[in-house]
Structure formats: structure tokens, C-alpha cells
Amino acid sequence: MIVNFGILVATVIAAVIALRSVNDARQARDEASAHERTALDAATRSASAAEVAVRHHGRTADTLEKQTALLESAATHREEWALEALTDPSIDQRWKATNKTGYDVMHVSIGAPDGFNEQWIKPDVEETADVPRGESIFFTFIRRLSSPTSRTIWVIWTPADGSAQKKFVKTIP
């Protein structure tokens, strides 16, 4: 009987230890599941943050590309008016000024630093004119024995949008 009682006590102790082990295993499983959920939430937040960062980097890259294009455009000197001689310079040389601004302009006048009524440069039209993009206005460089060999020409205009007046300056031979 003592032996049976000993076996019973040993069985009860083994059962208590087994129940405790099962309880510890369940607790460890629950903790692992909680850690896994926390890790999954952190990974989801990290992925969302990475997507936001990619969008911001994309916008930054787009902005940098636009700035680079603007800088390249500004660095590339583009003549806003093309001046072209139409006749030979022997006497009263006729010239054409073509609008290369890329937009329509208004109130265009041609003159020289000495003034718009100076004796060597005579526009075909004394009043200001509107000149669409790619179109031209004409003037004459009066050539005489006493005329200068070259003249600085001013083309002054206002963009059609009404923004500030602009000036193109070039010396013609």
C-alpha cells in the first residue's frame, strides 16, 4: 500500500508538472503570437513609411529635374530677336528684325541708344507695332559717307501678357 501510495503521489506530482509545462507552453505561444503581431504591425508601418518616402523622393526628383531644365535653359543664350540684313550695305541698308521670343509681343519699337529719332536708324513704321511670334518688323540703316560703320540697335517690346517691358540690344555691322 505504501508502494501504491508512493506511485499515486509520484503520478500526481508528474501530472502537476505536466499541467504546468502545458500552461508554460501556452503562455510562451501567446507571447510569441503577440510579438509576431507587433513585428507585423511594425513591418506594415515601415512599408507605409517607405512608400511615402518614395513618393516624396519622386517629387523631389521631379522638382530637381525641372530646376535643372530651367538652369540649362537660362544658361543657353537664346537671342530673342534675329536681325538680318536684306540688302547690301552700299546705301540705305534694309534690315529685318524677327520675333524669336516664343510668344506674341506688343508695343515693339526699334531704335538706338542715341534715341528713337536718331538719324541713322529709321523704322518702317514710326509707331509701336504688335509682332506675333515668328513675324518680323523692318528698319533701314541709313548708309552715307558720314554714317557710322556699325550701330547698336535696341528692340523694345512688351509681352502680350502685359508683363514688364523688355529690351534686346545688338550691334549690327
Image: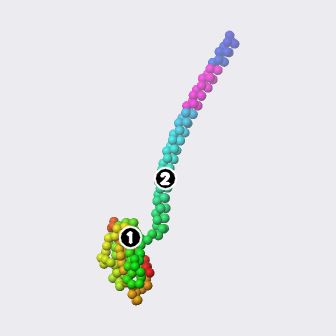
What residue appears at the point 68 percent right and 10 percent down from the top-left corner? Answer: 1
Nearest the viewer among 56 and 157 is: 157
Find the residue positioned furthest to the right. 3
Q: Which residue is mark 2?
A: 58
Q: Is residue 148 left or right of residue 160?
A: right
Instruction: Evaluate whether residue 165 shows in this view.
Output: no
Q: Is residue 54 left or right of residue 166?
A: right
Residue 124 at x, y = what percent?
A: 33, 78
Q: Main secondary structure of the magenta part?
A: helix
What residue appears at the point 50 percent right and 43 percent down from the top-left corner? Answer: 45
Nearest the viewer among 114 and 1 is: 114
Q: Is residue 19 left or right of residue 112?
A: right
Magenta part of the chain: 13-30
Residue 89 at x, y = what percent?
A: 42, 82
What colouring style does the render use? rainbow
Q: CA distance from mark 1 to mark 2?
A: 38 Å
